[in-house]
Image (cartoon, grey):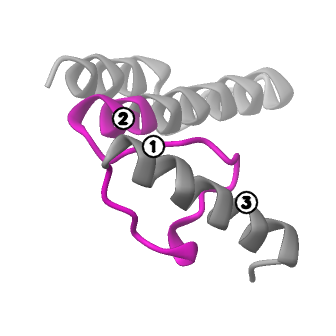
Amino acid sequence: MLTNKDRHYAVKRKKLWDSFGWVYRGTNYLSKNHSLNCGCKWCRMKTINNRLENKRNRLKARISLANKEVRTSIEDINMEYKRARWY
């Protein structure tokens, strides 16, 4: 649910996007970390890489806390990360 702070930020972002000529998608697309992602190939790849990196970090933390093997190995996550990184 959007707060007033989020809405005010979305209005400011719309003005910024208009000045650069980018396509504005609306207040519902406001990102959680308030980053300005324009939807181009590089911004999408950055998002995918961040998700995969977070997934790797969660698995590493789970392994270190449990001190045992996890079904999904770190190597599989690393391969997904490398595969997504170069497309």
Disc 2 and disc 3 in contact, CB within 8 angstroms: no
Viewer-nearest of discs 1 and 3: 3
Circle 3 residue: 9
Q: Report the residue marked by disc 1.
A: 37
Could you give the CA–CA distance between mark 1 and mark 3, rounded to whole angstroms? 14 Å
Image quarter of the C terminus: top left
Q: Identify the residue at image location x=32%, y=40%.
A: 44
Q: Which of pointers 2 and 3 lies earlier in the amino acid sequence?
A: 3
Instruction: Establish if 62 lies above or below 39.
Output: above
Rendering coords of residue 19 (x, y %): 43, 46
Mark 2 lies on residue:
43
Which residue lies at the image location 29% right of the left edge and 20% below the top edge? 79
Q: Give the SS element for disc 3.
A: helix
* Nearer-the-camera pick, 72 or 55: 55
Q: Residues within 10 Å of mark 1 (few under 14, many from 20)?
A: some
Q: Nearer the viewer, residue 67 or 87?
A: 87
Q: State whether residue 87 is above or below residue 1.
A: above
Q: Report if the CB atoms under discs 1 and 2 are less than 8 Å apart.
A: yes
Magenta-highlighted residues: 22-48
x and y percentages locating residue 73 in the rendered image: 46, 27
Q: Is residue 76 found left or right of 29 in the rendered image?
A: left
Query: Element at badge 2?
Result: helix
Determine the CA span between mark 2 and mark 3.
20 Å
Q: Where is the N terminus found, in terms of image quarters?
A: bottom right
Three-letter residue code for mark 1: Asn
Residue 38 percent location from the top left of the image: 37, 45
Name which residue type carries label 2.
Answer: Cys
Q: Is residue 10 left or right of residue 44?
A: right
Q: Amino acid at mark 3?
A: Tyr
Residue pictured at 60% horizontal, 41% vertical:
35
| Front residue of 50 and 31 | 31
Residue 43 in magenta stretch: yes
